[in-house]
Amino acid sequence: MRMISMMFGLSVAILGLANVMPTFDVLPRIGPFELSWFRPLLYWLCMLSVLAMALSQHVTRYHIAVSAVALTILTIASWDSYQIGLLLEDSVFFFGEREFWISSLVVASAIYIAYTQWGLPIAILGVLSVLYLLTGEYWPGFLGTGASDVVEIIPSNLWYSIDQGILGSILGIVSTTVLPFIILGAVLEGVGAGGSMIRIAFFLLQGFRGGPAYAAVASSALFGTVSGSAVANVVGTGVITIPMIKKRGFSSEFSGAVEASASTGGQILPPIMGAAALVMADIVGVSYATVMLAAIVPALAYYSSLFLAITFEAQRLGVQQAEDEIVIIPTRQDWYNLLLVFGPVFVIVYLLISGMSPAGASISAILLLFPMSFLNPDVRQRPSVLVRSLAQGGTTVAKLISVTAIVGIVVATLAATGLPSKLAVMLTDAANTSMFVALIISAIGCIILGMGMPTLPAYIAIISVMGTTLQGLGLDLIIAHLFVFTFGVASVITPPVAIASYAAASIAEGRPIGTAVQSSRVGAMIFLIPFAFVYNPALTLGAGAGLPALDTFLMAVLYLGVSMYLVTSGLIGFDRRRLSVVARLGSVALGIALISGESFIQLSALALAVVVIFARYRQPHLANSKDSTDV
């Protein structure tokens, strides 16, 4: 069944790439295809791939029977969507009970498939959305909606529309903008580029006290910005990095947390940001370069905080390079393989800035990567690895579309009920009392909505709910989107549904909840940096409104840098010696004050921070000391 899943994955990859293949002024035009048949066919192929993959893991009579029923429903429903789509192009069509039941069954199948791939939280979200769409008129208070015809509202919103629902605009975004980048990431991994990056990072950083952990951060950052999935990044790089971090002397939970936090940050790191930057640019209506510019300082700040966390933890434990530790020396081929990473990334950035579409830029990078991959002798010996990489990319797309179907249901429900506008009014009222309170409420909502989802569908679902709200608070549009996006990314390391942390825990053989808690501690700045750029917009380099004054920018960076130092040392509980509880709480409080956006508070906090840091460095360095404590 796994081979069948890969065959359908290859079909998804070929069909998706053909749909957005540019002509380059020399090739015959293939796509874009008619939406009436392309989207139902693509969704059908994706679900076949996912069902086949699920059966390869659980071959029981129950799973075979349920999968057969789901396949039958999806086949009938996809064909019916195509037929009715043709009718809607030329005439008005009134949905009846037949379309209602077909739509209901396909929605049930979509929720079941998402449950098998992504777990219970995603399925619950889908069920609640459908229930709210059906029963909204009976809900109390602001949740109540107007009366509606159930027979009409389900098919018109959830299945038979190319604007919303399962086959709607979100599937369109994934199939045109995101699919080529996922294929590119799969090919990069298949030709050996990822392994070479890890070996070179370990070689360059293994002499430092926290060497393997630093290397994990660096390699996961580079690979994560292309892969588009924190969990895939953890699984792909963590099997190498986590055991080596543990061998250096770090705990299983901390080792897994470092990998999970580093893999998560790849989604906010330009230039590619897991393709989310391209979707954000399209939704906001700005250039790709604007999004990349706005995200670069927050992303670098986050990764700097990870290095700080590792440094303080290494000091706390007193870890050193072991005498019997294997020294990794990259081969000449590893250095050559770096061309396979930076060549395509350079092409993508250059073409996007030059004005080419995201799909065209990513396909250009794939077309460049195919001949370049023969620099690797392993590819020359087994060129079939390129086909397998395409198939693997297609199965990844299929799995992603299984969850974007639920996001499509959620977004369609929100659009039909008008709930985001009601939430915006409520939070705007809260902002009249305190902007900070409104942002906290928004941040919690973003994390809850993003739990259990991959980055891109989480961002789309969250911005559908919270985007109007944050604009109502007076935030610049791109800053509001970055705020939402960053917290959506943070949800994968936030307990209780910290899917990236749990994936890392399984590799590290650590406690899942313990690893999730450690991830939130190591990557804590991902929860504070969005507030920093909301209150200090200079950190986004003007976000399309022109570059900030140099002195304003430098002060904002200084405040953020000192804040990172204080917050990270406070959460780790060590800075040259063990910190007392009072010192830790004070350190975190000073760090938060430094990004408050109030000049007097920031300057006062900066002065106190200088005194605190100076006092720490006046004291001797005591590694792993339990009897000597700062007060």
Image (cartoon, rainbow, N blue to C red):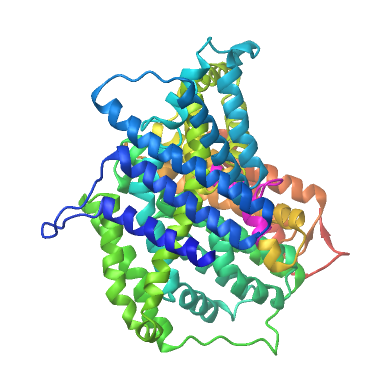
Name the residue located 25 percent from the left edge and 49 percent from the top edge: 357
Q: Residue furthest right?
A: 627
Left or right of 179 in this view: 69: right
Q: Residue 302: x percent and y percent?
A: 54, 54
Q: Is 525 drawn above or below residue 224 in the view shown?
A: above
Residue 532 in sight: no
Residue 182 in sight: yes
Q: Is 173 drawn above or below residue 64 in the view shown?
A: above
Helix, strand or loop for the magenta stretch, by majority: helix
In front: 74, or 599?
74
Q: Residue 277: x percent and y percent?
A: 39, 47
Left or right of 344 in this view: 322: right
Q: Is 421 drawn above or below residue 363 in the view shown?
A: above
Left or right of 362 in this view: 307: right
Name the residue located 11 percent from the left edge and 56 percent from the top edge: 25
Name the residue located 30 percent from the left edge and 26 percent from the top edge: 88
Magenta stretch: includes residue 471: no
Residue 239, quarter of the rendered image:
bottom right
Name the residue located 72 percent from the left edge and 65 percent from the top edge: 576
Q: Which residues are magenta?
A: 488-503
